[in-house]
Image (cartoon, rainbow, N blue to C red):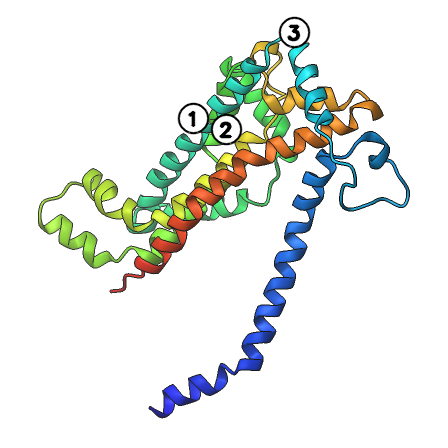
């Protein structure tokens, strides 16, 4: 009772209010760029270049969206083709990245074999290299394989992202009890069944989080360095070409930025409740 009373005393009303106020301030700071982007998407051109700049729109209009869709409708490749390429790459890339990262993380986290530590150290070191540093090497490898100007040039490197492998390995190592795996092996379960029926449900928070990061990365990826066929280019590339039209296309660019934000936000909203629920219910210990 004394320890419980000490814990309650430490969590004072003033301390809680201070923490909540700080978190609310951080939340407001984080949401301001999104609010400004939505506000700018409905601004007429005379409000976008007014000085001093205004945060909120005064005379909202939908002309920016009309201009954007009009420009996309006049392009050589139909808008639906750009959208299909982006959705196809995002969905297949995310699914492949989650599955391959999980399959590779399981033996690293729950099996001991020669060279496992060296492999994991290499994975950690690979996190330090950005795509700019590895761009030339990736292009040479993809060119030798004959994957340039195809979906494979974006999907295959995305499947092997080291961040997802690192995340899944760390989560499996700390949240999957060895006793459960040993019990399943004693009952005669094969490793493949243990992975899909036991490990993957336990690490659901990790792969849901990985879906958010992976989908956002594929959705915003242009792939201009590897794809030259206009019929295979993504929506992000098409919008960037429209926005580069000058000051007259500034409104269309603001509208495009809002449209590109919608799918990642929807993915986050859909998976957030599952992440919170599974985080609360998967705290299994030895």
Front in this rendered view, residue 87 or 102: 87
- Disc number for residue 92: 1
Residue 232: % across, % down: 56, 13
Residue occupying the far right of the picture: 51
Q: Is residue 208 left or right of residue 146?
A: left
Whether residue 253 is visible: yes
Disc 3, SS: loop
Compared to residue 51, the image places residue 278 above or below, namely: below
> Which residue position is annotated with label 2?
157
Q: How many angstroms separate mark 1 from mark 3 (CA)?
A: 26 Å
Q: Determine crowd level at label 1: few under 14, some 14-19, many 20+ residues with C-alpha closer than 10 A.
A: some
Q: Nearer the viewer, mark 3 or mark 2?
A: 3
Would residue 174 appear left or right of 182 to someone viewing this image? Answer: right
Q: Secondary structure at mark 2?
A: helix
Q: Secondary structure at mark 1?
A: helix
Which residue corresponds to mark 3? 76
Q: Is residue 57 above or below residue 249?
A: below
The mark nearer the N terminus, 1 or 2, is 1
Residue 184 screen position, x and y as percent = 14, 50
Pick the residue in front: 126 or 28. Answer: 28
* Earlier-in-chain disc, 1 versus 3: 3
Q: Residue at x 63, y 26 (%)?
A: 136
As drawn, the residue found furthest toward the bottom would be: 2
Q: Is residue 94 above or below residue 127?
A: above
């Amino acid at each position: 009772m004394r320890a419980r009373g000490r814990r309650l005393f430490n969590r004072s009303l003033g301390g809680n209010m201070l923490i909540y106020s700080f978190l609310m301030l951080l939340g407001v700071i984080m949401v301001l760029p999104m609010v400004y982007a939505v506000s700018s998407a409905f601004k007429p051109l005379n409000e976008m270049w007014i000085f001093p700049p205004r945060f909120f729109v005064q005379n909202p209009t939908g002309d920016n969206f009309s201009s954007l869709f009009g420009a996309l409708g006049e392009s050589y490749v139909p808008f639906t083709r750009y959208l299909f390429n982006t959705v196809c790459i995002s969905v297949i890339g995310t699914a492949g990245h989650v599955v391959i990262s999980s399959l590779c993380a399981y033996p690293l986290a729950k099996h001991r074999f020669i060279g496992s530590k060296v492999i994991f150290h290499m994975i950690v070191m690979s996190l330090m290299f950005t795509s700019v540093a590895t761009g030339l090497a990736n292009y040479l490898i993809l060119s030798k394989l004959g994957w340039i100007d195809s979906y494979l040039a974006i999907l295959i490197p995305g499947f092997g992202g080291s961040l997802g492998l690192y995340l899944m390995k760390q989560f499996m190592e700390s949240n999957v009890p060895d006793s459960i795996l040993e019990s399943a092996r004693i009952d005669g379960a094969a490793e493949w069944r243990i992975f899909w029926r036991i490990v993957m449900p336990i690490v659901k928070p990790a792969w849901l989080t990985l879906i958010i990061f992976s989908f956002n990365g594929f959705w915003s990826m242009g792939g201009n360095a590897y794809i030259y066929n206009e019929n295979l280019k993504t929506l992000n590339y098409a919008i960037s070409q429209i926005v580069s039209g000058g000051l007259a296309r500034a409104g269309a660019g603001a509208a495009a930025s809002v449209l590109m934000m919608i799918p990642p936000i929807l993915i986050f909203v859909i998976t957030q409740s599952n992440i919170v629920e599974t985080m609360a219910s998967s705290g299994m210990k030895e």
